[in-house]
Amino acid sequence: MAKPRVLIVGAGPVGLAAADRLLRNGAEVRIVDRNGARTILSKALAINVRTLEHLEASGLSDRLIEAGQRIHRMRFFGDGIPLATIDLSRLPHRYNYLVCLPQSETERILEEDLNALGGRVERETELTGFQQEGERVAATLSGPGGWEETATVDYLVGADGAHSVVRKGLGVGFPGSRHDLTWNLADVELDGPYGDDEATMHLQPEHAMLILPLGRRRFRIVTTVPDALNRLPVGRVVGAPSWTTDFTTSHRIVDSYGSGRVFLAGDAAHIHSPAGGRGMNLGIEDATVLANRIVGGGLETYSRDRRKVGLSVIGQTERMLAMVTLRSPLARALRDLALRTLLPLEPVQARLRPRLMGVAD
Ligand SMILES: Cc1cc2nc3c(=O)[nH]c(=O)nc-3n(C[C@H](O)[C@H](O)[C@H](O)COP(=O)(O)OP(=O)(O)OC[C@H]3O[C@@H](n4cnc5c(N)ncnc54)[C@H](O)[C@@H]3O)c2cc1C
């Protein structure tokens, strides 16, 4: 059988993961990105167990684990007072931890592996439109100086992020709604009781704050309100942040992950809040599943299967966000009481671990 020719639009983590797996599976791959260079931003940090499973066959999991920080515990504080700690290391799995690694590093590792396989990202190359013609897709690419090319391929993969041109070209709905929150993140050095192998959730009356390790006493602080740096309930910030930004979030999922020979993966298909750290992970899962099915068969149920997983993850993420942003004093008191009394119990932790670590859809 002839090698399938695949054009991937977008060289974020999802497009890179798809290209890597497709090349390994023997497909002929082009991957284009309109940007001139990879992101230098740390954006998505948490790499979960499911992603490590999906990237294991490529040998990429070992490299991501080696480059990142392993998280063995997740601690909860209410108003600065310790409530409970979940011991992630008791997950009965070979990966009994989460990995924290800046997205820029994850992308570097994925792209280096792609290059080692003979693949190359064509940068400053933008998809402007496409047409499905029988068993082929004709995609229009353009670049600096106004050059234009029509690439004819067997499959087009839209890994082109939240504002996906491929999604718009398919005309599929992207229903959902915006969260009424302005988030803030800061990557900074901290002095205080924060370990390089643990995540900390501070549940404050006005907001929630998650702290994740970046290594060598540097941490990511994410808050559900602006001004993360001035809201640390325990410990203190040392020096200036290497990156800080405000952002807003929505939760949306496409009505269909593809049509004909054009498929969507990653943020092009779903977006949600960072609660639970699932966004990039869910996209990398889409990428490897799609790449395996383009070569091995099963594309007819790709949309149905991935949408089911996406809906479930968005549901979990929304429930988690609602739980950490409770405003009513009574509801917060009950939540904190439940965390203090129930969370230390091993049967409760055993139920929560797979969700927190991304192995329960
Ligand atoms: C501030 C911030 C913080 C975040 N924090 C987290 C977090 O803590 N946890 C988490 O899981 N996620 C987080 N995310 C989300 C995470 O970064 C995304 O889920 C992830 O990048 C999605 O990967 P992707 O490859 O689908 O899309 P992207 O990373 O958006 O990549 C899409 C690529 O497509 C390219 N492109 C777009 N249109 C075209 C076109 N027409 N032609 C060619 N190329 C095109 C773009 O240049 C881009 O490189 C965060 C995002 C931001 C911005």
Image (spheres, rainbow, N blue to C red):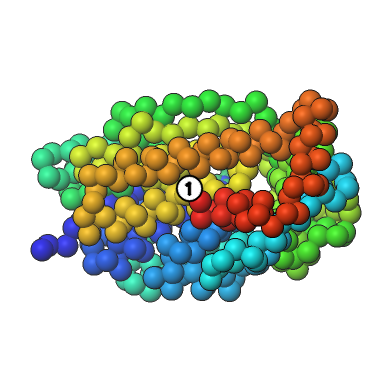
Residue at mark 1: C-beta within 8 A of ligand 1: no
In depth, the one of 259 and 112 nearer the eye is: 259
Residue drawn 49% across and 27% down? 176
Horizontal side, residue 274 vs residue 110: left or right? right
Q: Callout 1: 10 Å neighbours few (<14), some, many (20+)?
A: some
In depth, the one of 83 and 223 nearer the eye is: 83
Residue 66: x percent and y percent?
Answer: 58, 74
Mark 1 element type: loop
The answer to whether 349 is drawn above or below residue 128 in the figure is below
Horizontal side, residue 206 vs residue 255: left or right? right
Q: Is residue 197 visible?
A: yes
Q: What quarter of the picture does the N terminus occupy?
A: bottom left
Q: Which residue is mark 1?
A: 361
Residue drawn 70% across and 61% down? 87
Q: Quadrant of residue 288?
A: bottom left
Residue drawn 85% across and 51% down? 82
Q: Quadrant of residue 20?
A: bottom left
Residue 119: x percent and y percent?
Answer: 33, 66
Residue 124: x percent and y percent?
Answer: 39, 50
Numbered disc total: 1
Q: Is residue 38 visible?
A: no
Residue drawn 58% across and 40% down? 317
Residue 210: x percent and y percent?
Answer: 73, 48
User: Which residue type carries mark 1?
Assistant: Asp
